[in-house]
Amino acid sequence: MSEGKKLKKELLQKCESLGAKKVGIIRAESLKDSEAVYAAMMKILPEAKSVISFLVPFPKGCLHLLKDPTRGLPFYTRLAGIGGRTLDGISINICLFLEEHGFVAAPVFICTPLEMPKSLDLWGYLSQIDVAAKSGLGWIGKNGLLTSPVYGPRVGLGTVLTNAVIEEDRQSDVGKCPDDCFICVEKCPAGALDGTGKVNRLNCTATQAIAPISLMMTKEFSMKEHRDMIVNVGAVDEHTWYRCNNCVVHCPIGL
């Protein structure tokens, strides 16, 4: 077995042992057709040669509870906090594994770093949804989320960039949302979905959650010196009380 194949085999075993249920690997050069994704990746790790994308399913029970928001919101808020830490922990441990083998690796965390353009929209440095779809973990659904053929949109995503040259997975057609299904669009209280996979992020964020970041999105904000600190420290994570996840809860895929 070549060194490259041995590394990939050991890497996949490591990911599985950490709790990743599905892993996709794609070469950095294969993302050049998506200029924004490739540029963001180079911004994080300029020497990146490979991208490791993985998913972890979220318990359906916690999400099912959201059909009764008064009962389910505390459960989902806690799930989001713990789930995010789980994903970040897996990413960190994948990086450590690669560094033990002599490579450089950088995690893409779920909440930070974030950027806020003049529109007061929130953008992560790298779209983990786009990377996961391109690495074969699923497709981008009508709700704009990564949709797994096994778990639906009830998943968390993690991403690691590395200068290791790892054999990429052969891509295949993993599926798509049913043409006649628009449940997520109909259930969205913010009117943020148009059924094409595009999301009005401002409407979604303002409706989905209450957090310190909400103040910056609803009022004129001029504290430029503090903006990045608030975005990256108080934007999401456990400083957020979630109010809506209808597009995930009601999606029939993966149930």
Image (tube, helix red, strand yellow):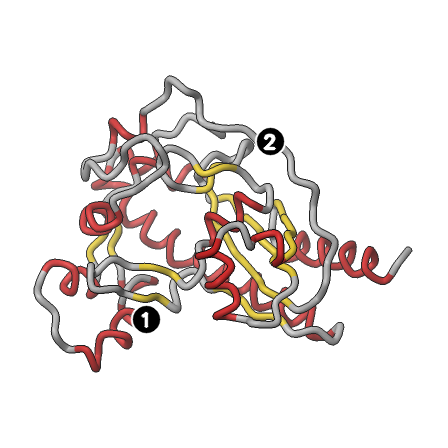
Query: Which label belongs to residue 247?
Result: none
- Quarter of the figure with residue 195: top left
Question: Which comes sooner in the sequence, label 1 or label 2?
Answer: 2
Q: Residue at x 78, y 54 (%)?
A: 9
Find disc 1 in the rendering and name its residue.
232
Residue 176: x and y, percent? 49, 28
Say if mark 1 contacts mark 2, CB within 8 Å.
no
Which amino acid does the dot numbered 1 rest on? Asn
Find disc 2 in the rendering and name its residue.
173
Relative to 87, say whether 74 is above or below. Answer: above
Which amino acid does the dot numbered 2 rest on? Asp
Relative to 67, say whether 208 is above or below. Answer: below
Q: Residue at x 38, y 29 (%)?
A: 251
Disc 1 crowd, CA 10 A, few/some/many (<14, 14-19, 20+): some
Farthest left residue?
Answer: 220
Residue 215: x and y, percent? 14, 63
Q: Residue at x 55, y 55 (%)?
A: 32
Taking depth in this image into account, of 179 and 96 the one nearest to the observer is: 179
Element under disc 2: loop
Say whether residue 11 is left or right of residue 193: right
Disc 2 crowd, CA 10 A, few/some/many (<14, 14-19, 20+): few
Relative to 192, say whether 250 is above or below. Answer: above
- Quarter of the figure with residue 138: top right
